[in-house]
Amino acid sequence: MNVIQTKNYQDMSEKATQFILDKIKSKSTFKLGLATGGTPVTTYQNLIQDHQKNHTSYQHVTTFNLDEYIGLSNENPNSYHFYMNKHLFRHIDIPANQTFIPNGLATDLEKECVDYDKLIDEHDGIDLQILGLGHNGHIGFNEPGTPFDKQTHIVTLAESTVEANARFFDSIDDVPTQAITMGIGSIMKSKEILLLVSGKEKHEALHKLLHGDVDQQFPASILQRHKNVTIIADEDAIMEKD
Ligand code: F6R
């Protein structure tokens, strides 16, 4: 794993933006895996600014999001469909039919999961998957204990994840308890992975990822076995304990 240390969140976001732009510009078709949550927000803002200033085009880019809550409509401000439109898609020139996010309202959710993996395969896989890191080591919504070979599937969120995500909702009771997520098996098929980590509260998780064993109880540890992972982390997240 290639680790890039940055001064702070802003700096992490700038490095991530440049990293993503270089990759996107290097190919005539590009499949980008996207994450939501707090960590990539400024990176997405930077991509928008670059698009406005330098006119970087996304016409050749297809995106696949990691996950979506079950039971929220696309218009619900807490759905990841809404998040992606708000924070990225509607500000760049990506064709809407080239942006994919699991449908948490599908009548047949099991089929939705199978179809999502098929769709990624039909596009020849993801070139670069962006990930954030959960406090408990989750990637996507793959909570501790998730088998490493799982493909896209339905999950019940860990209590700590519901609590962490409650900050985006009016009340913790409004946080959905289930989601569809790309599995660890699906994520590991990506040709390249970019993990973004910021803040003291992620220090323990990042330390475990960098120095711990590969263990299903800590999902992100599987990244040690991927051939092409870059971690961009700020000082607070990476700082070694005394
Ligand atoms: C988001 C996702 C999650 C987050 C993780 C970190 O699509 O799949 O794994 O990346 O929960 O979230 P933040 O960035 O809010 O700390």
Image: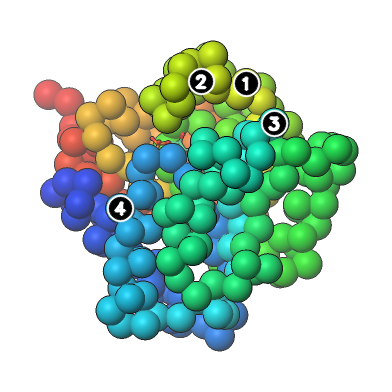
Q: Secondary structure at mark 4?
A: helix
User: Tag on residue 162?
Assistant: 2
Q: Nearer the viewer, residue 116 or 50?
A: 50
- Mark 3 CB near ligand 1 (8 Å cut): no
Q: Earlier in the sequence, mark 3 or mark 2?
A: 3
Q: Earlier in the sequence, mark 1 or mark 3?
A: 3
Q: Residue at x 30, y 53 (%)?
A: 42
Indicate the quadrant containing the C terminus: top left, top right, bottom left or bottom right: top left
The answer to whether mark 4 and mark 1 are in CB contact below 8 A is no
User: Tag on residue 42?
Assistant: 4
Q: Residue at x 69, y 47 (%)?
A: 102
Q: Is residue 208 left or right of residue 203?
A: right
Pointer 3 residue? 71
Cα distance between the residues tagged 4 and 3? 27 Å
Tell me which amino acid carries mark 3.
Gly
Q: Earlier in the sequence, mark 4 or mark 1?
A: 4
Q: Viewer-nearest of labels 1 and 3?
A: 3
Tell me which amino acid carries mark 2.
Val
Tell me which amino acid carries mark 1.
Thr
Q: Residue at x 31, y 82 (%)?
A: 54
**Residue 194, how many percent across, how many down?**
43, 55
Tell me which amino acid carries mark 4.
Thr
**Residue 99, how many percent across, how many down?**
62, 62
The answer to whether mark 1 and mark 3 are in CB contact below 8 A is no
Classify mark 1: residues with Cα within 10 Å, few (<14), some (14-19) or many (20+): some
Q: Secondary structure at mark 3?
A: loop
Q: Is residue 114 left or right of residue 2?
A: right
